[in-house]
Amino acid sequence: MVEIGVLLKLMIKTNTTYHISFTGTVLNSSSNKKIDMKKFASSVQSQTKALFNKIGNNPNITVSASISIRAINDKEDLKVRIL
């Protein structure tokens, strides 16, 4: 088993590319039904993508992310999708 410190040192010295794919769903189950869930999903999507894209501060590490967040109106709309 490789120790985390050794793994991090190897990552810093080599060119490494990470691509993160994230798919999520938001559902408004609060009492405030006036919340624009499509706008909220879009905001979560852009903030999450920006967060992952900022991870690679090391010039030898490239991090990119594709994020897909959708809004649903009912739990019945939630279906498991296999990518």
Image: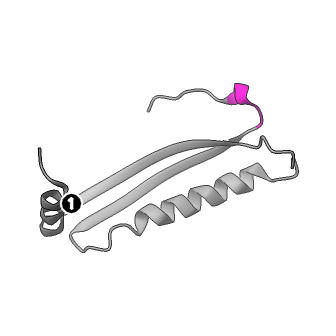
Q: Main secondary structure of the magenta part?
A: helix
Q: Residue at x 25, y 58 (%)?
A: 17
Mark 1: amino acid: Thr
Q: Residue at x 12, y 62 (%)?
A: 10
Residue 60 lies in quadrant: bottom left
Range of magenta residues: 73-77
Q: Is residue 43 left or right of residue 74?
A: left
Q: Is residue 34 left or right of residue 39?
A: right
- Measured as percent of width and height from the top left, residue 72 is found at 72, 38
Location of the C terminus by quadrant is top left
Q: Residue at x 72, y 25 (%)?
A: 76
- 2, above or below 14, in the image: above
Q: Tell which of 45 and 11 is nearer to you.
A: 11
- Measured as percent of width and height from the top left, residue 12 is found at 17, 68
Q: Is residue 74 magenta?
A: yes
Q: Tell which of 35 and 62 is nearer to you.
A: 35
